Image (spheres, helix red, strand yellow):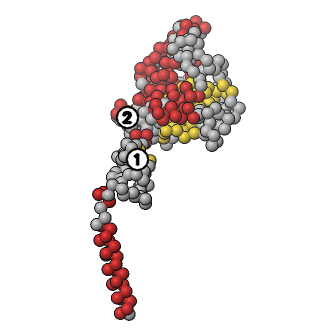
Amino acid sequence: MSDNIQNVCNWLDETEEDNLLYDSDDTDADPDFVCTNIHNEIDSESDTDVDVHINPSSSRINNASVASRSRSGSPLIRDNSSYYLVLHLPGVKRVARDAKSIIDCWKLFFPDMVIDEIVKCTNIYLTKIRTNFQRERNCLDTTREEIKALFGLLYLAGVLRSNYLNLKDLWSDNPLSPEYFRAVMSLKRFYLLLRALRFDDINTRTERKMYDKLSAIRMIFDGFVRCQALYTVGENCTIDEMLEAFRGRCSFRQYIPNKPNKYGIKIQALVDSRTFFTSNMEIYVGTQPDGPFKFENKPSSIVKRMITPISKTGRNITIDNWYTSIPLVNELLENHNLTTVGTLRKNKNKSHLAF
């Protein structure tokens, strides 16, 4: 037992001597010292990613966040934190923080100014068709309150999933039918308002249509896209297309067989990946006539228009293979400070040889 204790004491003495020798080794004083075993640990919970490049000719690394330089002057550590720093924290903006109820939130997207414009345009059309009615009282002008009531009934019909239901059943006296519809307005008035509902001046549409295929709803659509002024999206966004079901007469109606609704209006959208809040939208109308609304419809051009609200904010966007290309990804990173996640087709131009 005593021999074992003596061996342990001898081992401790040797270890202490080694430590003293190690502490006395001043590597900074030796200009020819080369560190061959440097291990830089980066905390996995750190908010920024740093690319570390170690040059054997350097003496030591002082701080991983500051670019050290070798004798040749080349940086050893590159700080890429600017690519990962998200500007403008996500959430409701100041202009919308006072909205406490559902109707207050709805008014942010449809303020009274927009409703009044819809009332004005609808009354223009009602005046135009009034001569077709034997009684003038059957085609009276509408008001702001009535248009809001019309929108409320449309919302209610959507909640009840009655898009394939005959309207007469909603206004029926049957106890199983909802009583809200017939309590708000008559079925004839509902039909008339749906027929006359307009979002632009019908008298000047022909002139505006010469340079804008979306002239019938341009005012209301541009006003609705003001949603980007109400909410700041999160750090991850998605750009994709959606097809709003529509089978009416429209020159830019699309047919996409792999969609749930094969016919409709195609809309490009920038959406928050977590909250699904739509920050930017653009309706695809094909090739516009020469004028202020004529834009390129190339995938890269669409993406660059969609990212306008989040440009240079350090966010990430996810796109599918129809949009993704190597030049676009590089441009988004260098010029807009946006990182990209996307699928890439093998036969796409300028694809990396690794693919």
* Mark positioned earlier in the residue sequence (1 or 2): 1
Q: Position of residue 205 (x, y in %)?
A: 55, 10
Residue at disc 1, secondary structure: loop
Q: Residues within 10 Å of mark 2 (few under 14, many from 20)?
A: some
Q: Name the amino acid type tagged 1.
A: Leu
Q: Residue furthest front?
A: 32
Separation of residues labelled 1 and 2 (CA atoms): 41 Å
Q: Position of residue 347 (x, y in %)?
A: 68, 35
Kindly tell me whether residue 45 is visible in this rendering: no
Identity of the residue drawn at 42% across and 24% down: 111
Please state if 260 lies on the left or on the right of 91 as rendered.
right
Q: Nearer the viewer, residue 225 or 247?
A: 225
Q: Position of residue 148 (x, y in %)?
A: 47, 25
Q: Position of residue 108 (x, y in %)?
A: 41, 29
Label 1: which residue?
76
Q: Residue furthest bottom?
A: 1
Q: What mark, if any, has residue 93 been given in the picture? A: 2
Q: Name the amino acid type tagged 2.
A: Lys
